[in-house]
């Protein structure tokens, strides 16, 4: 029997001067997203995901300790608590990518996952941390240490793989082996860097693993860093590797798509990649 899930992703430009205090920035960005959450609820969205560090700018072009002030505890910080309220109000699963404070001086790039009854299910911490011009992430984030969890939500089994993670097929495979039906990849990436890969890598992961992928990227330019144009173009990709819905390259937008989870069995029964894997032959990959 077909199982169809209505999923939504939100891409948004920074809406406040980055000279403002972190608390004010976080509040302004959260407030900017709320109308889109309401719009998603009106459209019947069952699972919703925001972009990477959705409640702030992408501050990693700097190496400024000011931005440690953006970090919050999960699940006891204000943003996660607010999303737990909204999830319960709208009967909606919400994936919340924010800057996590694990303890003083220890920070992660994290996504909290909240079930449709408002229950906090757990979190994913970004594993692969880049350190290249304009993306000084090792200054801000420790590498993730929670594995590749899959969350059994009311509507689907979902996983999260954050931004730079998408360049590494190993975690994408682990999410599939752990049972993911939909993988969300909240990102912050600019034209001229990885745009040529944007519609290659994630469809390839979808094909190799037989699941849906939701790829989210922010839009616009962010001063004072101006490292380039965040090109949006967020999309949903089905298990055949086909992009089935795509957002604007430049506009704030809620993108909604119906995902037929029955296609997962159909595709996996045709392409038996999980049956034909040879993990006993892959030992060199972990040396």
Image (cartoon, rainbow, N blue to C red):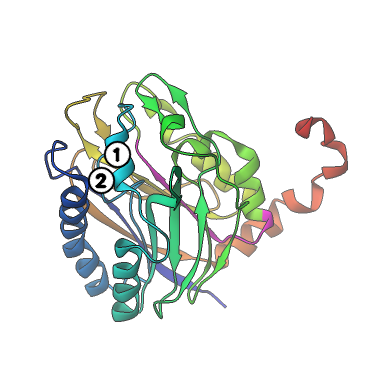
Question: Looking at the rendering, in which quadrant would you find the C terminus?
Answer: top right
Q: Judge whether residue 185 is colored magenta.
A: yes
Measure how far apart labels 2 and 1 are at the Cα level.
9 Å
The vertical placement of 230 against 262, above or below, is above
The residue at the point 15 percent across, 51 percent down is 24
The vertical placement of 246 against 19, above or below, is below
- The residue lying furthest to the top in this view is 133
Q: Judge whether residue 256 is colored magenta.
A: no
The stretch of residues the image draws in magenta is 177-188
Q: Secondary structure at mark 1?
A: helix
The residue under label 2 is 56
The residue under label 1 is 67
The residue at the point 42 percent across, 34 percent down is 198
Residue 236 relative to residue 23: left or right:
right
- The residue lying furthest to the right in this view is 280
Marks 2/1 in contact by CB < 8 Å: the verdict is: yes
């Amino acid at each position: 029997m077909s199982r169809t899930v209505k999923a939504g992703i939100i891409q948004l430009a920074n809406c406040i001067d980055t000279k403002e205090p972190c608390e004010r920035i976080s509040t302004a960005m959260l407030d900017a997203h709320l109308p889109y959450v309401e719009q998603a609820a009106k459209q019947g969205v069952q699972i919703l995901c925001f972009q990477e560090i959705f409640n702030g700018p992408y501050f990693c072009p700097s190496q400024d300790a000011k931005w440690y002030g953006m970090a919050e505890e999960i699940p006891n910080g204000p943003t996660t608590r607010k999303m737990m309220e909204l999830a319960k109000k709208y009967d909606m699963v919400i994936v919340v990518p924010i800057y996590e404070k694990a303890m003083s001086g220890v920070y992660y790039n994290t996504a909290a996952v909240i079930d449709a009854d408002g229950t906090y299910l757990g979190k994913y911490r970004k594993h692969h941390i880049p350190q290249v011009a304009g993306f000084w992430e090792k200054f801000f984030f420790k590498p993730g240490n929670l594995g590749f969890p899959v969350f059994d939500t009311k509507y689907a089994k979902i996983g999260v793989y954050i931004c730079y993670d998408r360049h590494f097929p190993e975690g994408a495979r682990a999410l599939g082996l752990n049972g993911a039906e939909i993988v969300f990849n909240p990102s912050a990436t600019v034209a001229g860097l990885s745009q040529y890969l944007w519609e290659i890598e994630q469809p390839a992961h979808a094909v190799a693993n037989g699941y849906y992928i939701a790829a989210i990227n922010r839009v616009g330019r962010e001063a004072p860093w101006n490292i380039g144009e965040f090109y949006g173009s967020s999309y949903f990709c089905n298990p055949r590797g086909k992009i089935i819905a795509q957002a604007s390259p430049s506009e704030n937008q809620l993108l909604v798509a119906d995902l037929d989870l029955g296609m997962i069995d159909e595709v996996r029964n045709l392409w038996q990649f999980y049956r034909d894997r040879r993990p006993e032959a892959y030992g060199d990959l972990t040396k």
